[in-house]
Image (cartoon, rainbow, N blue to C red):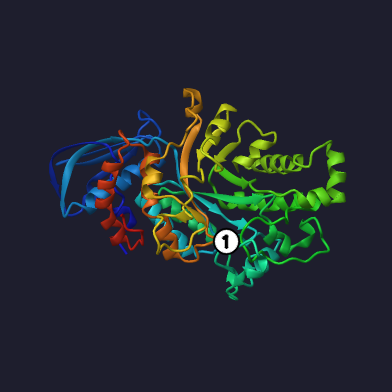
Amino acid sequence: MPDPLALVPLPQSVIYSHGVWETTDPWAGLSIGISEDLPRTEYTLSISPAGANLSAGSEAALADGRNTFAQIVAGSGGSIPCVSIVDSPKYAWRGMHLDVSRHFFTVQEVETMIDAMALHRLNVLHLHLTDDQGWRVEIKGYPKLTEVGAWRDQSLVGHMGEDEASWTYDGVRHGGFYTQDDLRGLVEYGQKRGVMIVPEVDLPGHMQAAVASYPELGNNPSQQIGVREVWGISDHVLGVSDQVFEFLRDVLTQVADIFPAPFFHIGGDECPRVEWERSTEARARMTEWGYTRVSEIQGRFTQFAYDVLTEKGKRVIGWDEVLETHLPDDMVIMNWRHANGVKTSTERGFQTVIANNEHLYFDHYQAKSEGEPLAIGGHTSVKDVYTADYSPKKLTEDEQKLVIGMQGQLWTEYIPTLEHLQYMAFPRMCAVAERAWGSPEQSWEEFEERLRGHLPRLDAFGIRYRPLD
């Protein structure tokens, strides 16, 4: 496999050519350093007959510049062009989300995706570690989370129709999990490539795998349920006992210790309230807490997670449903339900990551033509990703400053293999990379031309992708 650092494409930058630099060991002639005179996101790279110099305003920017130099070397054939580059990204957060809960991907497969991200100068891997269909992270003191919660006896085949009698299953046990050491290794792997891993523990909904492991964490402790075998949203959410909150403290603390990233995602999306509405214990806790609406229970979970994680030095991120309750001022919102949500969160003063399902959900079909692999539905082409207006309700200058980045989402209900994952990601990930980095002019025709020239790099890297039409 080619060196991933040798395949990172050049950014759309100001580049001035002066000749060539002949050398057999270019890395030996590269001097690297951090400069306090540069903005934190900027790097400068100069190559002359005397050698090469890379300066950057931070370690993250240095990684971007190092990858750029590697790309120049990779395409040089021994004759390296003398250039001067000054470059910086539009957004600090340039990410991809990967759901390893619906379908499990091995450490090596996740590393492959990290390599592909580095190839495109994407710097955040949002790792969705827990959900109804699987719990993927080892938690000390709670062995059943991985003995029970990491496995389901079978998976739904095809789409989940309205008639439950029509559902069919594959009859194949599916699962897996990462030890804490596995995840620390992934963190180190990403750091070497300029990719920060941000974990997500989704709460208080999307918790059926945890409740299946420990029924006392749910709202009906006497009921033994299994890990969810179908997709969609489970009504089984966390209960409200002190034991549940102690469980969350242990989980959040341990996961925060694994991942040094300054961010931690707590989910907060799609949380049904049916069990809380029926629970006498939930009603009693509402009285104790002074609540009058069941929806306020979710706010209690959000505040608790926030308190635990801020003690660990983390910035807390939530899907945009968390806006429906009172939030601490420094929460980060991940906008997913619609593009206009960017306006909603930023006008309330929250930093926001664009992740809307209209344009950035890569579990949608890439084309309307027949022959595409099974997907959840919808249609999002690479052109849609590149040309989308991500803020239909225009933002003020101050609101625009609160948009810290954007990312593509890979939800894996219908994506069981690495090959399928890559096919759904590419070439749409390429469009995210350029929109997140920022181009002087946003021209689909020019981007398509560059993309066609870039596809041989994906071929060389062994990445499967949907061919351009």
Q: Is residue 28 visible?
A: no
The N terminus lies in quadrant: bottom left
* Residue type, label 1: Arg
Q: Is residue 4 left or right of residue 363?
A: left
Please identify the quarter of the rendering in which residue 263 is found: top right
Residue placed furthest toward the bottom: 171
Tell which residue pokes out farthest to the left in this image. 19
Count of marks overlaid on the render: 1
Residue 302 in the image: x percent, y percent?
69, 42
Q: Nearer the viewer, residue 376 or 324?
A: 376
User: Which percent across, then down, holds residue 9?
Assistant: 29, 48
Identify the residue at horizontal 40%, vertical 64% (top origin): 371
Q: Residue at x 56, y 63 (%)?
A: 159
Disc 1, SS:
loop
Vertical side of 211 occupied by 52: above or below: above
Q: Quadrant of the C terminus?
A: bottom left
Q: Position of residue 261 (x, y in %)?
A: 53, 45
Rendered position, 144 above or below 304: below
Q: Position of residue 73 (x, y in %)?
A: 22, 51
Q: Residue at x 85, y 45 (%)?
A: 283
Residue closer to the observer: 248 or 385: 385
**Vertically, is 431 above or below 87?**
below
The residue that mark 1 highlights is 102
Q: Is residue 305 above or below residue 391?
A: below
Q: Using the rendered view, name the quadrant where residue 17 is placed.
A: top left
Q: Residue at x 65, y 55 (%)?
A: 233
